[in-house]
Amino acid sequence: MQMLRLLLTSFILMPASLLADQTDERLDGLFSTLLASTDLTNLRATENKIWEIWFEHPNDNVEQLMQLGVTRMNDNRYADAMLIFSQLIENFPDYAEGWNRRATLHYILGNYEESIADIEQVLDLEPRHFGALSGLGLVYLQQEQLSKARQAFENLIDVHPNSPNAQENLRRVNEDIRLNVI
């Protein structure tokens, strides 16, 4: 863990004032494609390109650390991943994907309120972040806050209307709400 802290300190050398992932001018056209296309192959390719842009950062070291954090999270090395994501956020608070990945880790760990707080940061930086909107809906489902989950999935559909997952999640929430009213 100490070695990881030293690695993080030595990697993060660039000031946070540079443009970050969610400010990329390519995103507007890609989000227009999400709004207009119904072709699943085209939608998936567009989503993937957006994720690539969100992951990008002007500091290559940040991208390397982000990849290391994702690898640690995928390998169930949650303490290391949390340290990496938290350091990225501390040093680059305008990097939305740092917040998003930590929100995902909080969700995995069952820290739902912390996940919501990080998702709110993501959405402040990039209101169209379909991953964060979906995650917010899933957190609210875990908390059995169906109305809030429905709102999150409706907001997701506003951004990405032809997402099969978004449509299915909204259908499921609406069904759960209907069943709870009866």
Image (tube, rainbow, N blue to C red):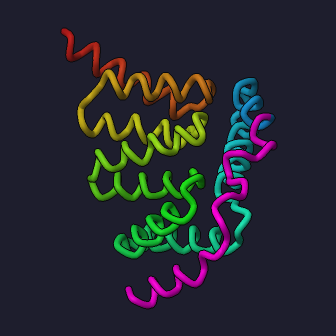
At 80% from the left and 35% from the top, the residue drawn is 29
Above or below, 110 against 119 in this view is below
Question: Position of 38 compared to 91: left or right?
Answer: right
Residue 99 x %, y %: 49, 53
Q: Nearer the viewer, residue 44 or 93?
A: 93
Question: Position of 85 compared to 17: left or right?
Answer: left
6 is within the stretch colored magenta? yes
Please give the count of numbered marks on the rendered protein.
Answer: 0
Q: Nearer the viewer, residue 165 or 113?
A: 113
Residue 6 x %, y %: 49, 87
Question: Position of 46 compared to 142: left or right?
Answer: right
Q: Residue furthest top?
A: 182
Question: Position of 18 compared to 66: left or right?
Answer: right
Part of the protein shown in magenta: 1-28
Image quadrant occupied by the C terminus: top left
At 67% from the left and 46% from the top, the residue drawn is 22
Residue 85 x %, y %: 47, 65
Above or below, 87 against 106 in this view is below
Residue 2 x %, y %: 39, 89
Q: Quadrant of residue 159?
A: top right
Image quadrant occupied by the N terminus: bottom left
Q: Nearer the viewer, residue 158 or 41?
A: 158
